Image: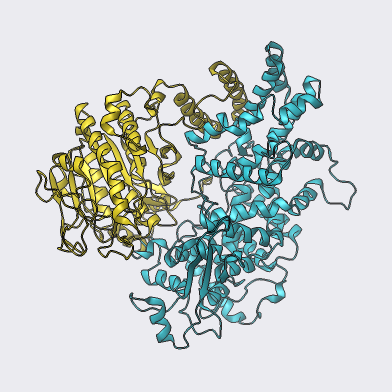
Chain colours: A cyan, B yellow
Amino acid sequence: MFGRNRGHGLMFLLALVSLFSVLAIALGMTAPVLADKSTEAAPDFPPDAGQDWKKASQWLGDQIEIKRKEAKLSPAKPCTDAEFCRRAYLDIIGTLPTRQEAREFIARPAKTDRKAPTKREALIEELLARPEYAENWARVWQRILTGPNADYNGAVLLQTHLRKSFAQNAPWDELTTELLTATGRSDGNAAIGFMMYFDNNNANVAGIVSKVFMGQQIQCAQCHNHPYEKWTMDDFAGMQHFFALTRSRRIQEPKKGIPEIWDVTESAVPKNLEALKQAVSGENKPLLPKYLGGAEYALDGDAKLRQSFAKWMTAPGNKWYREMAVNRYMQLLLGVGFVTPVDDFNSLSKPTFPEILDRMGKEFAGSGFDLKFLIRTICNSELYTLSSVPARKTKEDRVYFSHALIRRLMPEQMVFALMTATDVDGSGDRHDARKAEAYKRELLRHFNYAYSDDETARDVDDYSGSIPQALLIMNGALMATATDGKAKNTVQQVLKEKGEFNARLEELYLATLSRFPTENESARCKDLIQKSDNEVQAWEDIFWALLNCTEFSTNH
Amino acid sequence: MSKLVNVSRRDFLRTSAAGGLVITSSFLGANTLLAEPSAKATGTKKCKQVILLWMEGGPSQFETFDPKPGKKTGAPYKALETEVPGFTPCETFPKIAAAAKDICLIKSMTSKEGNHSRGAYYMHTGYIPNPTLKHPSLGSIVGHQLGKPDFDLPNFVKLRGAPFPAGYLGVENNPFVIANPGARIENLDYAKGVDKARMEKRMKLVEEMEKDFAKSRGSDATDAHKAMYDKARKLMDSPLKAKFYIDDEPQEVRDAYGKGKFAESCIIARRLIEAGVACVEVVQGGWDTHDDGFVRCKQLASEIDQPWAALLADLKKRGLLDTTLVVWMGEFGRTPQVTDTEGRGHWPGNFCVAMSGGGVKTGQVIGETDEMGEKIVKDPVRPQDLYWTFASLMGWDTTREFEAGPRPVWLVDIDKKLDAKPVEKVMK
């Protein structure tokens, strides 16, 4: 895959550039410097980068271990198989293992033979290959790109397109380029959902694209030169102008059951730069499009403006682009990455370990921007396998990955976790798939509404929740069905399947917390069951409590 | 031991300043731009509670309070003369016309955002929308600044409309949204087959589980969980819950407010204010009158005129108006040009905001537009100025720096270049 990158020449220039970068960092300046300012950056990494995730994974773990040793920090104990299983399901496919899946994984031998992959490696592969992988990451990225409202037309299309891309494991640069350059009608090309969402507000497109794909927050410079960063209003306008020749139009109102139709078009670039300047600037100060932190736009054959921009941004040598993606996946899978907040690579909150991030970025670009390579690298590394019970004096650590961080479930994860755990899917007695789909959508809407949380980059330590959120989980319709003696749900199923106390309790723990109960927990629950005058109700209460505790509503 | 928490920009700035290290030139720029707010909150701080009557869609200034009768651009209604010079609402607002002494009308509100969501954001927060930073809306700020942390009811209740997250103020300051005011609130009552005793049994089990979890992993997550559940349970069990419904409201009071969802919402708003809720937002949609505007605006006026006037009178009667600010506004106004279909487009250039109570000097009109209602000729008021005015009336802490990610942000915009300030004429 590395071969699709451009030549490896310009060694001298590269050396000069890296020298300059070091100087720049030493001087507290921002911004990695792109190798060649006029076009996209040439790759600046060795050809073996991104060729072997096992090596990359091992390297990542080793490097962090060195850092921990320097800081005299010990890592937490390795997590149990049960913990690993729950974590991997939530992170990779966005829901919990069923009680059967959890039991099966815990019981699996560590390795079938010497050459076979470990059971944890194998699980990661299995999850990456499941259809829910694409569903989950489509939801995750739709939220990052356009916010929590998934019902809006642009967002619906965006999710549709992303599902397809993730199912095919489309490389990140290809996927990004498709979103940024899409044209056509909404009934033919779902990729236009992204541009459609912004409804011709180029300022917002520029702000989101810089932030999400490059970790550069330029939005403040829309109105005044950035107070803290080097970005000026001209930098902002320069970015915005790449989207100025694009138009999103609604060409058909919604009709009975058929959603409205939109059309996104982009006009050709005028062959004369003066004319282009006028065309993109409107009534404002005439300025050419300008690559962020780079050169002004120069004529680029027949490429449309957005194509030139995407080519520049997704170049393997663009350090911002590749490192932003790595940082995002680290944050999604581990709670924090190397830069915090996740999408804010500014001049002063420098990466905790720039050289590790640098190498990881190169591995990712070298893999051909293979997102599954990135997930394999992170999830198979030692960082991902530690317990969330911190070792002595490391509770506060958010830098050295010395223990797994406790992360609250996003509303979408909560919905799917609850549906899996309770076995309530709204499909009714006749298992109507359409009914189930509508039920799922309704739950997602309710949970997003109740959580009412825009922050995809919320601080990992912020566990606060709203009143409607608690009310929904305590008293909502799903919970009522899940603890209703007459409905189809896990509790009733387990009571039917198993007659003996321990077997029953095990199933309920596996369904909710993906682990077996401790002795203490067993004793506590046994006491409750024995003292109750209505055993079914007592089981329902235990199940309700399991779904309403922190251990359930977090990923640990 | 080395630093375990990622160095945030703010910490870095503090460390560098204290340690006398080199501070980058960009930061010095920031310092001059933001360090000292040019405005000061100067009001009487009399205002303790707020009711926001939010007119969703962008109410026409012509068909409400700046009618320009007889002009080509004007409303096709008569304008009413009132006790207050310059306050000449359309004839569709007879009750509000009669309450002229209790209204301070700003005719010269001006914004730059003519798109619904952007305009609504600007008027709800006093900041231009920014996809990388979420500002809290008026109600969340009021709840945060004036609300009681241990109150049974949420400090900010929103009647209809979409939730507007409190952004950097955190989810605990989110609005508590009631989608269908007057009806039973979703999930607020115990589920079928569950009573208080059974809930207590369940929560006891949860508590035990929480203890185990916290013992090995620290209590940050379980503390937040407890805080959330405690608040929710307190609300479920509170007698004040009855304030959300109007079943026990006397008939004569209901008659005074009139009929319709907006009227019912206004009664609920008053009940909640009386109970001590810091801010209630009442949403009335339908103002996006591109077509058939003259008929629709008349209809909308008939839905809000009586309840709004009754709300002011009711608050006054109960001695609450002096300390309760009532604001009527929407995201923008509408074009002077009338379309072929008797509607008007979006027009952020000039529009109206009305305020009552809460230390506002009422019985006056602020600002003026030209003959055709196309331009402001006196005292323009920007959303930032309006929010400084709110800050002034309520005594918000305008100097406090909040952290939104690594950057500082203030409740009101203190950008020097913008030079926003309170509208002094509003203050008593």
Q: Is residue A398 left or right of residue A111?
A: left
- Residue B129 visible here: no
Q: In the rendered image of this protein, does residue A448 appear above or below residue A266?
A: above
Residue A205 locus on image (x, y percent): 47, 65
Horizontal side, residue A158 vs residue B369: left or right: right
**Occupied quadrant, residue A59:** bottom right
For this rendering, which residue is in front, B37 or A240? A240
**Which residue appears at 72% of the width and 27% of the height?**
A491
Q: The C terminus of chain A lies in which quarter of the figure?
A: top right
Q: Is residue A298 visible?
A: yes
In terms of depth relative to the viewer, which is nearer, A12 or A274?
A274
* Residue B135 rendering spot, x and y as whole percentages: 38, 49
Which of these two is toward me, B186 or A97?
B186
Q: Quadrant of the N terminus of chain A?
A: bottom right
From this viewpoint, which residue is outermost toward the bottom? A272
Which of A80 and A213 lies nearest the eye of the viewer? Answer: A213
Residue A39, horizontal then vertical, whole percent = 54, 79
How many numbered discs sit on the rendered protein?
A: 0
The structure residue drawn at horizontal position 36% and vertical position 52%, both measured from the top left corner, is B57
**Residue lying at 68% horizontally and 50% vertically, measured from the top left:** A92
In the displayed structure image, the side of residue A386 where residue A399 appears, left or right: left
